[in-house]
Image (cartoon, coloured by chain):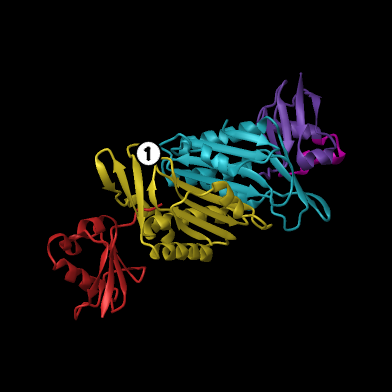
Chain colours: A cyan, B yellow, C purple, D red
Amino acid sequence: MSVSVQQADFDVGMETSALSAGDDGAGAVASFVGLVRGEDIHAMTLEHYPGMTEKALAEIVAQAHTRWQLRRVRVIHRVGRLLPGDRIVFVGVSSSHRGDAFAACEFIMDYLKTRAPFWKKEDTAAGGRWVDARESDDSAASRWEK
Amino acid sequence: MSVSVQQADFDVGMETSALSAGDDGAGAVASFVGLVRGEDIHAMTLEHYPGMTEKALAEIVAQAHTRWQLRRVRVIHRVGRLLPGDRIVFVGVSSSHRGDAFAACEFIMDYLKTRAPFWKKEDTAAGGRWVDARESDDSAASRWEK
Amino acid sequence: MTIKLLYFASLRERLGTPGESLELPAGVDSIAALRGHLAARGGDWQVFATSTSLRAAVNQAMAGPEAGVKAGDEVAFFPPVTGG
Amino acid sequence: MTIKLLYFASLRERLGTPGESLELPAGVDSIAALRGHLAARGGDWQVFATSTSLRAAVNQAMAGPEAGVKAGDEVAFFPPVTGG
């Protein structure tokens, strides 16, 4: 199962190993971990659209497979209440060579940020606050349209 | 110690965690693991230039810090005899945002491939064979000169 | 001839409901028309007319204003996504 | 007035030695001149004249053909690197 949406934390070492285990042709594994930054928040709650979330992530992974020569892809996104320093998301990609692994990993993160139905609400000293979408995420995703 | 050259394997989960542990501002960790591909080799021996290797890696990391806003960087490169599927290299970068983390991680790998004094010798059915430098690695590194 | 409506995140909080079952009125056959219909309820529902950032999905796929809406569909409205 | 010479990888195997201490001859003050001096030994050492891919480092930093070489330096020769 290459896509998971879950409340539980994940094991980065295990997930990274699984991307190349038993695969003699996997020479490169690129991965990304996104974390809750805690500069001025107490906690963060991640809401999502069950059903559509998994479909959107699977579609992004399928697109990555058509664009690059990839061996395995793994996407994990947590939902529910998270604390500063907690892991939010894992994207890992294995390939024969590093160029494809790096590009696909970044592509999946950029598309996930703008196309997968997750919403963050921060719990701050001043109360709850829905996180605004960032213009820079739109421009990061649009790079891949060329 | 951000750079290590060692015979021993490394723990990807532990290394990845260490890049953000206790740092509330680290929102992104990009990492790369390079592995011995085993399509037609029995083993691989990595030779290096002790002293220069560590200096070259530290210089590449220092350059990455001047180009991007990074929080922590970790580079581990193994030497000696390795088997198919074994990890060779780990590069991990933490930053506030993912763009800088991805770019710096790929930059460090591209420069490491062309500037750090390591040499691979493959042990094949036909005997020992020194790996040739790849043109594509030179062009990957030259992208960053612009 | 109903559709299932879902609201997420700040929109859900603003409307005070996670969704509803709606009898599709005659002539409401697109996301744009559905937004007009919901905005006509007035009060907080006017956000469907005034917001330029609201996104929509039909049957769990992103959908623009011209996307068709028919009986049995699952239609969701939500603010721009902020995961990752 | 000696320098320390190091050879790595396929070059080390070809020359049959990992390095040597060399009394620096008069006039040999650059990587290019040093390559010429070593090539003059003949046999396998001619690789210093014929190879276009051989790299050099002076005191553990990459060095081009014009780089200066002086007494006390550590000079290394090796093929293009293939780590990572």
Vertical placement of residue C6 versus A137, above or below: above
| Left or right for A35, reference C4 | left
Q: Magenta stretch?
A: C39-53
Residue D54: % across, % down: 26, 61
Q: Nearer the viewer, residue B64 or C5?
A: B64
| Left or right for A129, reference A52 | right
Q: Nearer the viewer, residue D14 or C47?
A: D14
Q: Nearer the viewer, residue B58 or D21?
A: D21
Residue B126: % across, % down: 24, 39
Residue D63: % across, % down: 32, 69
Residue A19: % across, % down: 51, 38
| Left or right for C27, reference D82 | right
Q: Residue visible at 21% across and 56% down?
A: D14
| Left or right for A78, reference B140 | right
* Residue D37 part of the magenta-drawn span: no
Give the amino acid at mark 1.
Gly
Vertical placement of residue C1 versus A13, above or below: above
**Number of labelled discs?**
1
Residue designated by label 1 = B38
